[in-house]
Image (cartoon, grey):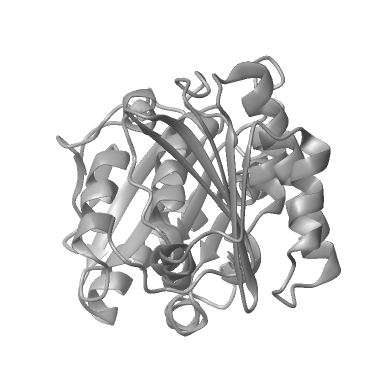
Amino acid sequence: MTATDQRGYDHAAVHYTSDAELLAVVVPFLEKGIAAGEPTVVSLEPRRAELVRAALPRSAGTHYLIIEDVYVRPAAAIRSYRDLMARLVGGGATGIRIFGEIPAAAIGADWSSWARYEAAVNHAYDEFPLRSMCAYDTRTTPRQVLDDVARTHPFLATPDGGHHVNAGYVDPVAFLAAPQPMTPYPVQQTAPLVELIDPQPPAARRAVLDFDRTGLPAAELDDLVLAVSEIVDNALRHGRPPVRFRLWAGPGQMVVTVHDTGDGVGDPFAGLLPADRHIGGRGLWIAHQICSQVTLHRDDTGFTVRLTAGRPPGDVTPA
């Protein structure tokens, strides 16, 4: 085992191909924490959570989170975990262990935002005495996801008890600063319902309200209106003209892109962590908290923010 005592956060990936392999990693990991008096937390899909529960002593005291509540969106997951760990440390914990997984539906819908999450948590959680393991079933996880997992986890845990330094790990700042793909959703294969050049925020808000053909709940539509207003204002203030606003809508879904020809926000953690010190950071933080999906994309034409209300289909067409 590689010593990691100098790190605040020991962040490991687990690749498994069976329930037996999963349990061979998670049970000893949690049992060591239980024996040391550390709070232990599990955030897995219900069937796998029950396997873990059955394998641990009834007196273990492990806390089981509802995975759908934790992984609603990346920024919300970071905030939720940070709040949880702050409470545990405030209660006297000198070590914390978390074993979890990102839901399969989240991986299929918009993995790029969760890849940013996996990179950002190396910074976001480093102030806490945390050991965590992120489980990925190699039978069902796409190759491009596993490639990102390899670049966002400093350590690798294996069913034989190994815990190794990951030679493929990329510093989170470098990972987040690199160009990320933005795969179009099927609804984006059609012409946008609205296209505006250099719109002021009120015009962008009206466009969202006037072209709502989705049947989205009023609260979710209101959240999108707020996010659109913030992102358009950011682009006008801090981007480079022209600012192009586009909107698509379908049953249960609305997608908005805001593009400008500038370099985008300079903070690699923008949107995922509170950024009151950074230019443009507040609007991205708000958008990440309230939109079902937020995708950031840089290319040679500039910077694009895509905001989605409703759940996008799991199958997308490669760019």
Rendered view: 56 above or below 77 = below
- Going by the image, does 168 lie left or right of 75? left
Q: Nearer the viewer, residue 281 or 19?
A: 281
Q: Residue at x 66, y 66 (%)?
A: 69
Q: Give the residue drawn at x 32%, y 73%.
A: 23
Can residue 298 be seen here? The reply is yes
Q: Position of residue 54 (x, y in %)?
A: 47, 83
**Foreground: 118 or 292?**
292
Image location (x, y in percent) of residue 269: 52, 29
Give residue 2's quadrant in the image: top left
- What residue is rendered at 55% in x and 57% in y? 40
Residue drawn at the location 18% of the way across and 51% of the way down: 162
- The picture places residue 84, in percent across and down from the top left corner, at 68, 47
Count how many numbered circles sit on residues in the image.
Answer: 0
User: Can the viewer see residue 226 in this picture?
Assistant: no
Q: Quadrant of the C terminus?
A: bottom left
Quadrant of the snapshot with the N terminus? top left
Residue 141 as seen in the image, left or right of residue 183: left
Instruction: Name which quarter of the figure residue 161 lies in.
Output: bottom left
Taking 158 as reference, is 232 left or right?
Answer: right
Q: Nearer the viewer, residue 190 or 93?
A: 190
Residue 251 locus on image (x, y percent): 63, 79
- Front-lying residue, 198 or 66: 198
Would you place residue 21 above or below residue 78 in this image?
below
